[in-house]
Image: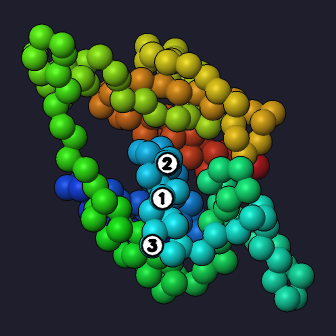
């Protein structure tokens, strides 16, 4: 089995860790994380931090090789043809700018002066998680987890994104299903 690459970051007091087969997958995870948090802020920080972007879906090298850039929004992609050291610089620059422009959420008030606390707000608007794999979403639904809605995949409109209500139990079951499928795939490949 190949070497796994690890990445850990601390953002606004939250620690995020990834262990992937490639640096490129970690780079994709990084951008997906921030775009899910706040797409508009991510676009703003990309511009502010000077992260290299493109108006094209692909980067074409001098030798003719093509690398797919990371989709952000219409006519905006983040370059992915970076070496690990350049990726580390992008991470540091982006996270620093993100945290400098992080706003501490202020309590909202109703007309009668009653404050809406973070706990009440969390109960009103559930945290959501995008699931891009239909079989994973169906397994989670069968296990009793709530589907909030579906939407078209911006990168490939012929596919749907399943937006699930994120709970600790849902994350636990999602990790269980992913590991189960990985083990089953390896078992099936060995027994062919």
Mark 2–mark 1 contact, CB under 8 Å?
Answer: yes
| Neighbours of disc 1 within 10 Å: few (<14), some (14-19), many (20+) | some
- Which residue sits furthest front? 111
Which residue occupies the foreground of this view, 136 or 190?
Answer: 136
As helix, strand or loop, the secondary structure at mark 2 comes to helix
- Tell me which residue sits at (20%, 47%) in the image: 104
- Residue 168's quadrant in the figure? top left
Secondary element type, mark 3: helix
Assign the N terminus to one quadrant of the image.
Answer: bottom right
| Alpha-carbon span between mark 2 and mark 1 | 6 Å
Asked if residue 31 lies left or right of residue 168, the reply is right
Q: Is residue 127 above or below residue 4?
A: above
Chain-order first, disc 2 or disc 3:
2
For marks 3 and 1 on the same chain, the one whose residue lies earlier in the sequence: 1
In the image, taking residue 81 as reference, residue 105 lies left or right, namely left
> Rounded to the nearest whole Å, what is the CA distance between mark 2 and mark 3?
14 Å
Q: Crowding at label 3, few (<14), some or many (≥20) Cα neighbours within 10 Å?
A: some
Spot occupied by residue 24 in the image (x, y as percentages of width and height): 59, 69
Residue at x 73% of width, y 56% of height: 75
Q: Is residue 59 above or below residue 26?
A: below
Q: Looking at the rendered structure, which numbered label has been put on residue 4? A: none
Q: Label 3 belongs to which residue?
A: 49
In the displayed structure image, the side of residue 124 where residue 89 appears, left or right = right
**Residue located beneath label 1 in the image:** 44
Residue carrying label 2: 40
Residue 61 position by quadrant: bottom right
- Work out whether residue 173 can be spotted: no
């Amino acid at each position: 089995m190949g070497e796994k690459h690890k990445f850990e970051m601390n953002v606004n007091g939250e620690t995020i860790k990834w262990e992937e087969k490639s640096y490129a997958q970690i780079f994709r995870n990084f951008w997906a994380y921030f775009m899910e948090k706040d797409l508009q802020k991510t676009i703003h920080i990309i511009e502010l931090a000077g992260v290299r972007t493109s108006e094209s879906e692909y980067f074409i090298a001098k030798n003719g090789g093509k690398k797919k850039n990371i989709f952000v929004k219409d006519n905006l992609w983040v370059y992915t043809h970076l070496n690990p050291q350049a990726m580390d610089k992008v991470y540091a620059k982006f996270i620093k700018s993100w945290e400098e422009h992080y706003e501490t959420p202020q309590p909202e008030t109703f007309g009668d002066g009653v404050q809406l606390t973070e706990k009440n707000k969390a109960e009103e608007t559930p945290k959501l998680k995008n699931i891009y794999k239909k079989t994973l979403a169906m397994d989670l639904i069968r296990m009793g987890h709530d589907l909030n809605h579906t939407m078209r995949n911006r990168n490939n409109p012929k596919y749907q994104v399943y937006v699930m209500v994120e709970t600790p139990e849902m994350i636990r079951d999602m990790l269980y299903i992913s590991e189960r499928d990985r083990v089953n795939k390896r078992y099936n490949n060995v027994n062919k």
